[in-house]
Image (cartoon, rainbow, N blue to C red):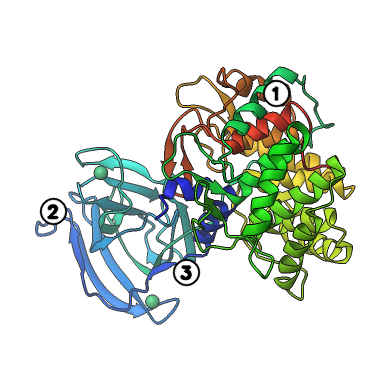
């Protein structure tokens, strides 16, 4: 079986799997009953203590929980709590509906994890509300209140939620709460004020490119397939990485290219597709997954190889792959909901002379995946998550179709939102999402697309190249959510280093 690390290095798939998380169903406590809710108040049994009673009442939808409170001179709070053993780590936001009356008091939302860490948020003087109000907050808006063996809120292991009414004086009133919901909200993004003014070029170093190409050649096995990573067992050959290797060999080593093409022609499925990866030493499929992105990359790479070398022997293989992609096309011109997948298909169609299909997918991309409000690409249809590839590869696509201003906006958006430094502060570049730490391949794609400060970022990558030409996927191992960075030396980062010092493959 594939380890997650290996699978996730097939960037296109990994982006899609992680982005579909966005569509996870919300978790809602609809507050239809008082079951598991308990009420308490400070000094509640003493003469000047606080008092609380809870009822069911008419909610925004069916029932809501009504808290009737009387804060006393010696009691500053009254609250309800619910035992709530739940993993809420797949969400990032909380919302609930609120209405109330009487003297306005503060409302506090609190959440507690298994080791007793309490986080919360206080809304001041909010409880006197004649109409229902929706209150939304991000997990990141919650503050550490108290408790726990650590100060981290373990969202995978939540124990309790609380709604507390607090005040500094004697107050009477009531508040109704309904539909406590955990959900995933769109990311907060930083919008650049202006797009970068031009496309930036870099100083190309032929010796860096030569060494990168030589290392990739060393990864080629007797079968013709190119092992995606160094010293991996079994040594996987991911289809996307084979396409990159072919694009390098097209310029550097025609014999190696022919050897790779020969095996890929044999591995092509009868319908024109390829599996997403193979075992480089045996040519066995590594997965039964078919991904349009990697098929498109291979089809594009073969067509580009033919153009570079004038060797047309394998063009029918590339066109057969286009036929498969074409068979996946929907009425609206899309081949998939993923921005990347559709961008990849455009290059395959364009380079193979499928002009009608290229035009249709282009129109779909511009009308459904380009986010005109934020002047950047969404990650997919109705998926505004922020990922790097849609901006960098998207910028290359936009340039190719004559939308240069949009391309400059997309690159500025990437720099504004995804620029980061490694945890050890040694390298500055871009992350795929987050951002957390530097993803070398993605940073080089930004450089290739002509992003602002391209030379600065390239310098940060150049000094990581090993003596024999290889480049790591990332300088640091890091894993969080859908992001998985390995320190392994790989074909994809090394190939993009080659492209940065020669020419981006994504040119018309
Ligand atoms: Ca309800
Ligand atoms: Ca904790």
Whether residue 71 sits left or right of residue 294 in the image: it is left
Whether residue 6 sits left or right of residue 252 in the image: it is left
Question: x, y (%) of residue 479?
Answer: 42, 41
Height in image: 128 above or below 394? below
Residue at the disc numbered 2: 43
Q: Secondary structure at mark 1?
A: helix
Classify mark 1: residues with Cα within 10 Å, few (<14), some (14-19) or many (20+): some
Instruction: Check mark 2 vs ligand 2: CB closer than 8 Å? yes or no.
Output: no
Classify mark 2: residues with Cα within 10 Å, few (<14), some (14-19) or many (20+): some
Label 1 or label 2, whichever comes before in sequence order: 2
Residue located at (61% from left, 51% from top): 239
Mark 1 or 2: in front is 1
Residue at the disc numbered 1: 210
In the picture, the disc for residue 130 is 3
The quarter of the image holding the C terminus is: top right
Task: Report whether residue 459 is seen.
Answer: yes
Q: Camera-side residue: 102 or 248?
A: 248
The quarter of the image holding the N terminus is: bottom left
Q: Camera-side residue: 177 or 466?
A: 466
Residue located at (28% from left, 49% from top): 169
Q: Secondary structure at mark 3?
A: loop
Question: x, y (%) of residue 237?
Answer: 55, 47
Q: Residue furthest left?
A: 46
CA distance for labels 2 and 3: 29 Å
Height in image: 359 above or below 378? below
């Amino acid at each position: 079986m594939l380890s997650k690390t290996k699978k996730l290095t097939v960037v296109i798939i990994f982006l899609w799997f992680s982005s579909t998380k966005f569509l996870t169903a919300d978790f809602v406590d609809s507050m239809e009953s008082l079951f598991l809710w308990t009420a308490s108040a400070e000094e509640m049994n003493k003469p000047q203590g606080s008092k609380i009673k809870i009822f069911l009442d008419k909610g925004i939808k069916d029932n809501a929980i009504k808290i009737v409170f009387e804060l006393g001179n010696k009691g500053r709070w009254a609250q309800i709590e619910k035992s709530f053993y739940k993993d809420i780590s797949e969400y990032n936001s909380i919302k609930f509906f609120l209405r109330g009356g009487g003297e306005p008091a503060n409302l506090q939302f609190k959440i507690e994890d298994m080791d007793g860490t309490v986080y919360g948020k206080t809304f001041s003087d909010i409880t006197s509300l004649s109409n229902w109000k929706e209150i939304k907050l991000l997990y990141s808006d919650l503050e550490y209140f108290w408790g726990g063996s650590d100060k981290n809120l373990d969202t995978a292991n939540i124990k309790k939620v609380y709604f507390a009414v607090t005040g500094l004086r004697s107050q009477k009133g009531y508040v109704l709460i309904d539909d406590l919901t955990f959900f995933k909200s769109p990311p907060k993004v930083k919008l650049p004020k202006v797009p970068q003014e031009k496309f930036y070029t870099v100083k190309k170093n032929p010796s860096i490119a030569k060494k990168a190409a030589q290392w990739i050649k060393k990864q080629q096995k007797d079968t013709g397939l190119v092992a995606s990573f160094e010293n991996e067992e079994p040594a996987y050959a991911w289809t996307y990485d084979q396409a990159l290797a072919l694009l390098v060999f097209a310029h550097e080593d025609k014999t190696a290219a022919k050897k790779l093409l020969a095996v890929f022609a044999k591995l092509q499925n009868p319908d024109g597709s390829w599996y997403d990866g193979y075992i480089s030493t045996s040519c066995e499929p590594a997965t039964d997954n078919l991904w349009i992105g990697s098929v498109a990359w291979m089809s594009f790479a073969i067509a580009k190889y033919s153009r570079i070398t004038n060797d047309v022997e394998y063009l029918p293989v590339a066109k057969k792959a286009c036929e498969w992609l074409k068979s996946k096309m929907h009425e609206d011109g899309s081949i998939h909901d993923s921005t990347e997948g559709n961008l990849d298909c455009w290059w395959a169609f364009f380079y193979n002379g499928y002009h009608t299909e290229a035009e249709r997918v282009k129109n779909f991309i511009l009308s459904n995946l380009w986010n005109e409000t934020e002047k950047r690409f969404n990650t997919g249809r109705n998926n505004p998550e922020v990922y790097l590839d849609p901006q960098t590869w998207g910028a290359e696509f936009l340039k190719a179709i004559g939308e240069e201003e949009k391309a400059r906006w997309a690159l500025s958006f990437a720099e504004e939102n995804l620029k980061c430094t490694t945890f050890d502060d040694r390298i500055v570049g871009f992350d795929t999402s987050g951002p957390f730490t530097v993803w070398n391949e993605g940073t080089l794609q930004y450089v290739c697309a002509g992003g602002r400060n391209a030379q600065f970022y390239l310098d940060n990558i150049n000094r990581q190249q090993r003596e024999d030409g290889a480049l790591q996927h990332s300088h640091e191992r890091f894993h969080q959510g859908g992001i998985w960075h390995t320190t392994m030396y790989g074909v994809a980062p090394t190939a993009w280093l080659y492209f940065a010092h020669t020419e981006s493959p994504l040119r018309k």
